Amino acid sequence: MSLPILEHADKYVCRSVNDMSLPSLLEPDRHWMKLALREAERAYEEKEVPVGAVVVRDGIVLGKGHNMVEQLKDPTAHAEMIAITAACSAAGDKRLDGCTLYVTLEPCPMCAGAIVWSRLTRLVFGAFDEKAGSCSTLYNIPRDRRLNHLVEVVSGILAEDSAALLRSFFAERRLAAGPSGS
């Protein structure tokens, strides 16, 4: 796992108080999601399912990660888990109050639980996950009022870019497996 980088977002803050258009308001989220997409591309290059994640507080990246399940032979080595662990280490705290997690794919139940337990303030994700999505598709763990912490969830940011990367990865895998699927 690489050390967290510090990257400032000052230039991505809305310049005009009058510019309250949706594209203008979403620009900071789009910026950080692009960084998460770069992490997903790293996973793709490493033959991992291309999911990337970045944890940001006050315009500074505290942690980032991409799927490393195959590399580490660890089913918990999801992009979100790696980014959250790096962010907690950088923050020197198990709680990530005031932080936003940007991830290219809707988190699974394990990662959604970690998002709640780490007390992230916001979750921003790209593509929806019909098979394991636990932040709106199958479940809504971060917004479940029975839990001790609620997380603000924003979905669909650069969703098509995230989905296209996943489609390409799995198409390549199917092609490499050949017609028998082995």
Image (cartoon, rainbow, N blue to C red):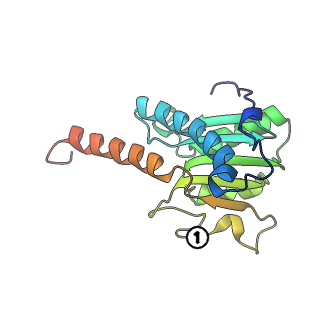
> Which residue is painted at 33% across and 43% down in the image?
168
Query: Is residue 77 visible to us here?
Result: no
Q: Nearer the viewer, residue 106 or 85?
A: 106
Residue that protrudes farthest toward the bottom in the picture: 146
| Residue 165 spot, x, y in % from top left | 41, 43
Q: Is residue 128 above or below residue 6?
A: below
Residue position for label 1: 139
Residue that protrudes farthest toward the left in the picture: 179
> Which residue is painted at 69% across and 24% down in the image?
3
- Location of residue 169 (image quadrant): top left
> Which residue is painted at 47% across and 47% down in the image?
162
> Which residue is painted at 50% across and 38% down in the image?
40
Dividing the image into 4 quarters, which one contains the C terminus?
top left
Q: How many marks?
A: 1
The answer to whether 136 appears left or right of 145 in the picture is: left
Q: Is residue 73 above or below residue 103?
A: above
Disc 1 packing (10 Å; few <14; some 14–19; many ≥20):
some
- Location of residue 8 (image quadrant): top right
Query: Is residue 141 visible to us here?
Result: yes
| Residue 134 spot, x, y in % from top left | 58, 64
Q: Secondary structure at mark 1?
A: loop
| Residue 127 spot, x, y in % from top left | 49, 55
| Residue 135 spot, x, y in % from top left | 61, 63
Q: Is residue 30 above or below residue 44?
A: below
Dividing the image into 4 quarters, which one contains the N terminus?
top right
Q: Is residue 71 above or below residue 15?
A: above
The answer to whether 101 appears left or right of 70 in the picture is: right
> Of the residues shown, which amino acid type is indicated by label 1?
Tyr
